[in-house]
Image: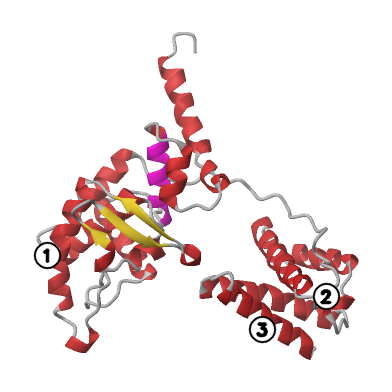
Amino acid sequence: MDNVKIYLNFFVEYLQIEKNYSQYTIVSYVADIEDLFSFMKEQAIIHLEEITYNDTRLYLTELHKREYSRKTISRKVSSLRSFFKFLVREEKLSENPFSLVSLPKREQKIPQFLYEEEIEQLFSISDCTNPLGQRNQALIEVLYGTGIRVSECCNIQLSDIDLYIGTVLVHGKGGKQRYVPFGSYAHDAIEIYINDGRKSLLNKLSKQDQHSYLFVNHRGSHLTDRGVRHVLNELIKKASLTLHIHPHMFRHTFATHLLNEGADMRSVQELLGHSHLSSTQVYTHVTKEHLKKIYLSHHPRA
């Protein structure tokens, strides 16, 4: 199966150079494709051109036997379809055996979000007289005030922040960049943190280890996604909220609150950095419930 590995390497180069995908995304593609290679060995299939539509059906049956979720199976099929489409484009294969495979319908989960009272509770917890309290306050104000992804938040550099006009340059998925505005609460929290708390935390580092990341941990190093989860868990404990909050909930809350207050879908799509409007439309399920409650509460004939 030497040519199989060569084709995979070609595909990885394509994802890196032409598609500009992140390393995390590429690793997922490779894992999905190598899983098919393992299946090929079990079925004594040596060359990719030997795979037929019937083989793809057998492979899908195998995935169902492993009790993978519909979301996982959809991702794997999508990865393999892209891989074979690339090989057909490069004239390595004559046809794509996954082109006729239909993706299983994904379960439509309503995004979890925080109510305004819960958000207010979280904002009142941090002790802004010490460096970590200032960092925590700035962190949750940025997450809620911009709706950016946690990975995007962790990678903000000082040069990305414009306090004068209240915007942050966000480096999103696939190398895409966008400017996202933030309000006065986030502005004040960021300014206090940059001028005071961040400087104190950075003093713990040696000169050669200094960096320009906005958010730092208690040792002064770059704050990671995992670090953000720890910060939020600690805030939840202090607030005595019986919630299981994951960092992405701030993004869900940002979008839901904007739509509830009358923001249009296209603007929210742009702020979130979604490539497709369908990704943003999932939040309409939440806002419809909100509108229904208002209707039932206020309409005389409800």
Provide residue 77's location: percent of width, then percent of height: 72, 63
Q: Is residue 65 left or right of residue 21?
A: right
**Label 1 to label 3: alpha-carbon separation:** 47 Å
Q: Is residue 147 above or below residue 227?
A: above
Name the residue rendered at 68%, 72% in the picture. Answer: 32
Q: Earlier in the sequence, mark 3 or mark 2?
A: 3
Secondary structure at numbered mark 1: helix
Dot label at residue 9: 3
Q: Quadrant of the N terminus?
A: bottom right
Range drawn in magenta = 248-259
Name the residue rendered at 25%, 61% in the picture. Answer: 161
Dot label at residue 195: 1
Q: Is residue 70 left or right of residue 93?
A: left
Q: Is residue 170 visible?
A: yes
Q: Is residue 140 left or right of residue 92?
A: left
Which residue position holds label 2?
93
Q: Amino acid at mark 1?
A: Asn
Q: Nearer the viewer, mark 1 or mark 2?
A: 2
Provide residue 252's location: percent of width, then percent of height: 43, 48
Q: How many marks?
A: 3
